[in-house]
């Protein structure tokens, strides 16, 4: 079917689920970032709680391991006073037994109000969103290579925090774009917010086919790609990709595409460096840069909680 | 029993006939058209006013799911679906469980299918034992049991030497080797056409080169072995170009396309709609249009349904875990009409691509209304709309991109061997 409707929006245009940054109208993204502004300060309070989700049950449904993302969602939900249930479901046990939708049905029967879902298959969150009954919200916490929209939004929040506006920025996304849901979510969010120059940088084996159709320019020479950049987003290189048909070695990857002080010097002097974590120091990023003055990697984590609070509050209509 | 079909528009490409006339059937065969033969008295008259009378459809790929996958479909359900779709002859691939690599299994399938007195079933034997791509099957024995060719279904033969030997062995007897044109390492467990849509949705891609590399391998081995090859389910523009060139070189090659690939593209996947997962994958609009041109210029010999019934569990999963394929026997005719309208192809030509041409390719007497031929006939109302729903589909597989959509063109009567086997 053609893309005739957007499954994450209600008929009145409000956010029903958060599945992808693709197709989110600009005003909705800006609204989420503004809402997040109000939540940043909650973390600094003595009592780090607001009652927005009091009485609501949030199920963290993780079919793929992730300590960091699950924890930040858990903190975000708890700061909104929700009841949080964490489920780590080994993907192999579901393939043998209960199907994904059966699992969801069972949990829905326990009166879940919101599912935060991570799954190894692209489109898993969409499938669940189509399946749940009205009033139950689904937040995609990462589906395959497809999307990681809260990471995309927190990256936008971070960029906006340091750079104010998007209309004059050059942003480079570096590394394993092929397998990266973060890259896809960042690209859609950046282009929607009016960023005029989004670049992806990596070896041909890690750049997906026809990626330019997403509104980015492709560079294989990192030094040229970083020229004049305001923002450098480094992507994590998964261990299993380091030696094989895609790359000969982590060492060679670092030489060509690892972010070092020298390479970063090609970007603007006030460029910020971001990374969705967890980092492979010495593979995609040098420690001097990761811990350097231009790095905003830790603030990203802090903002991540506020952004996830904003998303949760928005989908329940608070 | 003598049957007279009157007032229908008779279309038969084999005789370049397109005319409103009566068709007379006696002793299971076409007796005459236009004027009744001497001493003909109709036991039954079928009024086909406003309808089209054409040869029964010949479908080059329909999975009947027996033996082994009765939870997806049964011989009874799918044989009924066939005649409800106007299909009077069908080829079933060997990917059953157990696979059709034993003469006994083939005989049993033929016997059970024959006992239903519906469509004619032409099994393909497994090219290798268990479709494992290692040991050749007993092709001569399987042919005696009724196989019309040998196919490894969607399972790859990764060892090119095994493929070479299989083609060489089949060529010894003149058997036709059916092959999917997909190099499995390049396909690399991909799930969608490697292009813009797969990139955006984060789906692992199957590049067009998986198809072209395999066609190049196959045609090279054809020259060495002299094997006759039928390529099943082309998907790309470059693939069509290679087959066109191979035919121009005089290689004994034929090929088919699934009807969905003439109508749909990867854009239609939308938000991960698993009903649009196919093997080979739906490719981009330029590929779809090239396939269409390939059918029109004769590079592609036939259109098939690639009928693949599944239960709901096979599709109610994330796109990458969904099993490929769609139910098709009942959609082949209306979708072929839809394609003909889109591609502005004359109706007789479109019907020929699902009857006479696949019959010729199989070398069976079907696909024409010539006098003396078995009376395998499809009568359909070209203007009747019907909704594709789990209720209207006779096939046990309710999996289709066209579910809950309306299609134009509905079969009203199907005859096999002069017997009315379906009437709506």
Image (cartoon, rainbow, N blue to C red):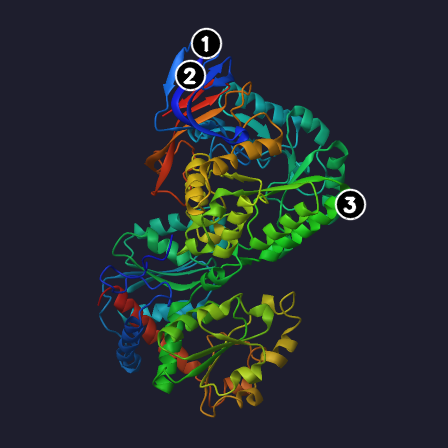
Question: Which chain contains the residue that carries disc 3?
Answer: B
In this view, the residue in front, A87 or B91, is: B91
Q: Is residue A252 left or right of residue B87?
A: right
- The residue identified by callout 2 is B4
Categorize mark 2 by other alpha carbons within 10 Å: few (<14), some (14-19), many (20+). many
Q: Residue at x 41, y 43 (%)?
A: B341
Question: Quick one: SS at disc 2?
Answer: strand
Question: Quick one: SS at disc 3?
Answer: helix
Mark with earlier residue (2, 3): 2
- The residue identified by callout 3 is B224
| Residue A295 on image: x %, y % | 46, 85
Query: In which quadrant of the rendered view does residue B267 lie?
Result: bottom left
Residue mark closest to the camera, 1 vs 3: 1
Disc 1 to disc 3, C-alpha distance: 55 Å
| Residue A103 on image: x %, y % | 39, 50
Picture layout, residue B301 above or below residue B103: below
The quarter of the image holding the C terminus of chain A is bottom left
Categorize mark 1 by other alpha carbons within 10 Å: few (<14), some (14-19), many (20+). some
Q: Are marks 2 and 3 in contact (CB under 8 Å)?
A: no
- The residue identified by callout 1 is B40
Residue B282 shows in this picture? no
């Amino acid at each position: 079917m053609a893309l005739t409707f957007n499954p994450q929006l209600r008929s009145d245009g409000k956010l029903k689920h958060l599945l992808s940054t693709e197709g989110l109208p600009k005003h909705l993204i800006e609204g989420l970032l503004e809402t997040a502004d109000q939540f940043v300060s909650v973390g600094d309070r003595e009592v780090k709680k607001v009652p927005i989700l009091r009485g609501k049950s949030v199920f963290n449904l993780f079919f793929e391991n992730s300590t960091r993302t699950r924890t930040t969602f858990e903190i975000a939900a708890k700061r909104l006073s929700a009841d949080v249930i964490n489920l780590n479901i080994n993907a192999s046990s579901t393939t043998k037994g209960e199907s994904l939708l059966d699992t969801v049905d069972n949990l829905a029967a326990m009166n879940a109000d919101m599912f935060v879902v991570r799954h190894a298959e692209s489109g898993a969150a969409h499938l669940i969103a189509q399946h749940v009954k009205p009033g139950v919200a689904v937040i995609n916490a990462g589906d395959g290579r497809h999307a990681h929209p809260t990471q995309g939004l927190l990256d936008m929040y971070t960029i906006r925090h340091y750079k104010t506006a998007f209309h004059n920025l050059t942003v480079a996304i570096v590394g394993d774009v092929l397998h990266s849901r973060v890259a896809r979510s960042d690209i859609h969010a950046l282009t929607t917010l009016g960023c005029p120059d989004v670049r992806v940088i990596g070896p041909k084996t890690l750049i997906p086919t026809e990626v330019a159709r997403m509104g980015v320019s492709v560079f294989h020479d990192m030094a040229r790609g970083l020229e004049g950049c305001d923002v450098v987003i480094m992507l994590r290189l998964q261990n299993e990709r380091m030696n094989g048909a895609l790359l000969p070695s982590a060492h060679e990857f670092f030489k060509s595409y690892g972010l070092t002080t020298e390479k970063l010097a090609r970007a603007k002097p006030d460029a910020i460096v971001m990374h969705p974590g967890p980092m492979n120091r010495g593979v995609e990023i040098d420690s001097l840069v990761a811990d350097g003055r231009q790095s905003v990697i830790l603030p990203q984590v802090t903002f991540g909680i506020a952004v996830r609070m904003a998303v949760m509050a928005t989908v329940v209509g608070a | 029993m003598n049957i007279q079909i009157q007032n229908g528009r008779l279309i038969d490409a084999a005789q370049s006939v397109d005319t409103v006339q009566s068709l007379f059937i006696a002793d299971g065969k076409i007796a005459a058209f236009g004027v009744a033969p001497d001493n003909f008295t109709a036991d039954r008259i079928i009024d086909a006013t406003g309808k089209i009378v054409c040869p029964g459809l010949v479908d080059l790929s329909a999975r009947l799911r027996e033996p082994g996958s009765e939870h997806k479909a049964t011989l009874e359900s799918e044989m009924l679906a066939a005649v409800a779709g106007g299909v009077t002859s069908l080829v079933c691939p060997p990917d059953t469980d157990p696979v059709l690599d034993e003469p006994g299994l083939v005989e049993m399938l033929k016997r059970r299918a024959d006992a239903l007195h519906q469509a004619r079933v032409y099994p393909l034997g497994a090219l290798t034992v268990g479709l494992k791509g290692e040991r050749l099957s007993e092709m001569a024995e399987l042919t005696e049991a009724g196989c019309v060719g040998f196919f490894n279904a969607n399972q790859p033969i990764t060892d090119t030497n095994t493929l070479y030997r299989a083609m060489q062995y089949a060529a010894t007897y003149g058997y036709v080797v059916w092959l999917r044109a997909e190099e499995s390492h390049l396909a690399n467990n991909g799930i969608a056409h490697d292009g813009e849509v797969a990139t955006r949705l984060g789906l692992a891609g199957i590049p067009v080169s998986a198809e072209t590399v395999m066609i190049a391998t196959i045609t090279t081995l054809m020259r060495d072995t002299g094997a006759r090859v039928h390529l099943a389910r082309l998907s790309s523009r470059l693939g069509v170009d290679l087959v066109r060139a191979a035919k121009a070189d005089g290689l004994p090659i034929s090929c088919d396309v699934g009807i969905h690939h003439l109508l749909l593209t990867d854009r239609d996947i939308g938000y991960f709609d698993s009903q649009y997962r196919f093997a080979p994958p739906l490719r981009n609009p330029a590929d779809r249009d090239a396939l269409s041109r390939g059918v029109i210029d004769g590079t592609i010999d036939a259109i098939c349904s690639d009928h693949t019934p599944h239960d709901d569990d096979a599709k109610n999963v994330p796109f990458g875990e969904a099993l490929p394929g769609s139910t098709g026997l009942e959609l082949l005719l209306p979708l072929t009409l839809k394609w003909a309208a889109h591609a502005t192809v004359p109706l007789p030509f479109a019907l020929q691509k699902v009857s006479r041409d696949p019959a010729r390719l199989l070398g069976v007497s079907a696909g024409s209304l010539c006098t003396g031929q078995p009376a395998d006939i499809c009568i359909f109302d070209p203007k009747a709309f019907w909704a594709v729903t789990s209720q209207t589909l006779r096939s046990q597989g309710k999996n289709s991109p066209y579910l809950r959509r309306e299609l134009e063109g509905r079969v009203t009567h199907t005859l096999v061997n002069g017997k009315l086997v379906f009437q709506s």
